[in-house]
């Protein structure tokens, strides 16, 4: 494992811990998109079906279990424990379009036409756009708590760092994966405006507010 992959995975873990800290500490899921969290649960469950029959390493297995379990736990917190703090009127992005488009592209681009490979491809494309409901919600409110922006930054940084991981692996191993590369670039690009505002606001100690 190269340093870019390791740091990216740590950033991914950090994003989840930050989100859990925000929800548990404030006893609220205000400002968090339930639809984005639902999409991430679908992503992890469909991507890691090989957990039942394929073992790469202890690290790999533990990470897969953690991502599935934490995503389901976050859904539980938002849907049941802190349901009263969730504002569905702000979380209005039509995720059925994302699911449908990802399913079609996943089917058309799968490397091997087996169920697990098609679902893997589907999960990669879905992850590329899973943050859209959260960004759309942020656009509607125009502002966010600092800890929520830290969560989004860590989540975006994780995917951006994976681009460097892919470059490293291509140079070092000749490894190619155009599905993951294309989806990863799209996902990182979706964060570009957020990164810009995050740097000029939160990074400099100001409140996160979108330009009016």
Image (cartoon, rainbow, N blue to C red):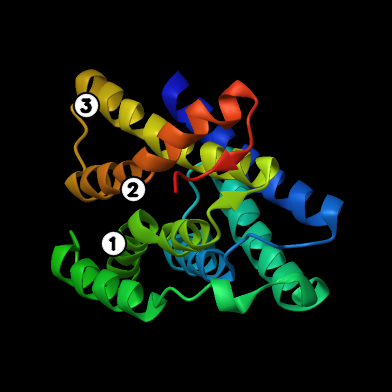
Alpha carbon separation for disc pair 3 and 1: 20 Å
The disc at residue 73 is: none
Residue farthest along the left direction in this orientation: 108
For mark 3, does the 10 Å Cα neighbourhood hold few (<14), some (14 to 19), or many (20 or more) residues? few
Q: Of callouts 1 and 2, which one flags the residue occurring earlier in the amino acid sequence?
A: 1
**Callout 1: SS:** helix
**Quarter of the figure that contains the N terminus:** top left
C-alpha distance separating marks 1 and 2: 19 Å
**Residue 93 placement (x, y as % from top left):** 43, 73
Residue named by callout 3: 170
Counting the numbered discs, the total is 3
Query: Horizontal placement of 98 versus 23: left or right?
Result: left
Residue density around tag 1, few if under 14, some if 14–19, many if 20 or more, within 10 Å: many
Q: Nearer the viewer, residue 35 or 58?
A: 35
Provide the secondary structure element on which disc 2 rests: helix
- Quarter where residue 194 is shown: top left
At 63% across and 30% down in the image, what residue appears?
A: 206
Q: Position of residue 202 (x, y in %)?
A: 59, 31
Q: Is residue 62 above or below residue 30?
A: above
Q: Residue at x 60, y 78 (%)?
A: 88
Q: In the rendered image, which residue does mark 2 sit on?
A: 190
Which residue is identified by label 1? 121
Label 2 CA crowd tier, 10 Å (few <14, some 14–19, many 20+) = some
Badge 3 vs badge 1, beta-carbon distance below 8 Å: no
The answer to which image quadrant residue 125 occupies is: bottom left
In the depicted view, which residue is nearer to us: 25 or 6?
A: 25
């Amino acid at each position: 494992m190269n340093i870019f992959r390791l740091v990216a995975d740590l950033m991914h873990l950090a994003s989840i811990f930050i989100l859990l800290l925000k929800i548990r500490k404030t006893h609220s899921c205000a400002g968090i998109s339930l639809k984005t969290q639902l999409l991430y649960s679908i992503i992890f469950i469909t991507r890691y079906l090989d957990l039942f029959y394929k073992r790469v390493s202890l690290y790999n297995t533990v990470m897969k279990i953690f991502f599935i379990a934490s995503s389901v736990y976050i859904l539980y917190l938002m849907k049941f424990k802190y349901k009263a703090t969730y504002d569905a009127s702000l979380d209005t992005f039509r995720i059925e379009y994302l699911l449908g488009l990802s399913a079609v592209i996943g089917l058309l681009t799968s490397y091997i036409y087996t169920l697990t490979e098609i679902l893997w491809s589907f999960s990669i494309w879905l992850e590329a756009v899973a943050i859209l409901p959260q960004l759309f919600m942020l656009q509607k409110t125009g502002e966010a708590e600092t800890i929520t922006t830290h969560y989004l930054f860590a989540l975006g940084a994780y995917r951006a760092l994976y681009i460097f991981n892919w470059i490293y692996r291509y140079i070092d191993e000749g490894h190619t994966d155009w599905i993951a590369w294309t989806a990863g670039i799209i996902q990182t690009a979706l964060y570009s405006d957020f990164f810009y505002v995050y740097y000029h606001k939160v990074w400099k100690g100001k409140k996160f507010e979108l330009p009016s």
